[in-house]
Image (cartoon, rainbow, N blue to C red):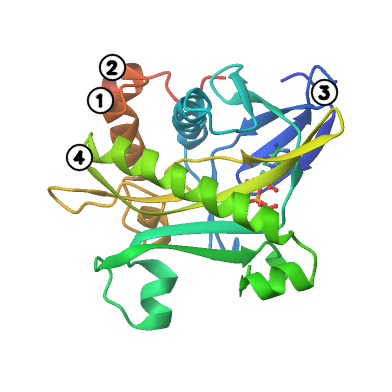
Amino acid sequence: MNTRRTRIYEGKAKILYEGPEPGTLIVHYKDDATAFNAQKKAVIDGKGVLNNRISEMIFTRLNELGLPTHFLKRLNMREQLVREVEIIPLEVVVRNVAAGSLSKRLGIEEGTALPRSIIEFYYKKDELNDPMVSEEHITAFNWATPQEIDDMMHLAIRINDFMSGLFLGIGIKLVDFKIEFGRLYENDMMRIVLADEISPDSCRLWDIKTQDKLDKDRFRRDMGGLVEAYQEVAKRLGIMPELAEPERSRPQLVKSD
Ligand SMILES: Nc1ncnc2c1ncn2[C@@H]1O[C@H](COP(=O)(O)OP(=O)(O)OP(=O)(O)O)[C@@H](O)[C@H]1O
Ligand SMILES: [Mg+2]
């Protein structure tokens, strides 16, 4: 690892380094897994490599569709080059099927199809456990303007439409996912772009035939087989055939780089 690189931020799952040009960052995907606001932690060999590749694929396709994202290019097995943005301190959650906190809060059985897709906002504040907030809170506290909320909601719906179709085509139900947006300043202009990552860490993905969970709930709920599940997602997306092979034929996997 290049030790001369300036580390800007180390989060729970990724490290941000200064990029080669102003306005760029290098995102390094770690193998660390956390849940319940980092009360539960583990290192899961190979997770970072898989998330880097899966996120790369989805962001590339979104860019091609004209949906603005921070993603520029993948650099290596664990790193990608992105545009630096001013992160809006909100987690935007899109739900298609009831699961997780929505099921708990509203008493709706997990797996119940929602009458329509639902968008929720959570304030990014670990000390407060990322509480759910409404548009009233967001505008009153100036976390985002009404126009920015509108932009985020429109983008979130288009991202959901694209991803639902992408996963449906490979036998996976997109139950819900979390995204983050940022402000990108370009010659006196500002626009909202998709930032952070989209991976099985940030989505709920259920196999349509078996209902098997292919996402981070395997870690949250101590089900095991997390890397195998992420590999299955990668394999179905047509990426990293080397990672879809059984363990014995890839002994150098995950520890390399
Ligand atoms: N293009 C970008 N420019 C600036 N910051 C970014 C960009 N993309 C993602 N980030 C931020 O980088 C961090 C990624 O690290 P990680 O996902 O490990 O964080 P985290 O532990 O989940 O913490 P946080 O609560 O801050 O999200 C996040 O804080 C995310 O908001
Ligand atoms: Mg994060």
According to the picture, the residue beneath numbered tag 4 turns out to be: 171
Q: Which amino acid type corresponds to the residue marked 4 in the rendered image?
A: Gly
Q: Position of residue 225 (x, y in %)?
A: 31, 45
The relative height of residue 119 versus residue 173 in the rendered view (above or below) is below
Distance, label 3 to label 4, CA atoms, is 41 Å
Single out the mark in the foreground, 3 or 1: 3
Distance, label 1 to label 2, CA atoms, is 6 Å
Q: Position of residue 130 (x, y in %)?
A: 63, 67
Is disc 4 surrounded by few (<14), some (14 to 19) or many (20+) residues within 10 Å? some
Q: Earlier in the sequence, mark 4 or mark 1?
A: 4
Q: Which amino acid type corresponds to the residue marked 3 in the rendered image?
A: Arg
Please give the name of the residue rendered at 76% of the width and 18% of the height, measured from the top-left corner.
2
Is the Cβ of the residue at disc 1 closer than 8 Å to that at disc 2?
A: yes
Q: How many marks?
A: 4
Is disc 3 surrounded by few (<14), some (14 to 19) or many (20+) residues within 10 Å? few
The relative height of residue 26 versus residue 157 in the rendered view (above or below) is above
Is the Cβ of the residue at disc 4 closer than 8 Å to that at disc 1?
A: no
According to the picture, the residue beneath numbered tag 2 turns out to be: 249
Q: Is residue 42 visible?
A: no
Single out the mark in the foreground, 4 or 1: 4
Q: Position of residue 176 (x, y in %)?
A: 39, 56
Q: Earlier in the sequence, mark 3 or mark 1?
A: 3
According to the picture, the residue beneath numbered tag 1 turns out to be: 246
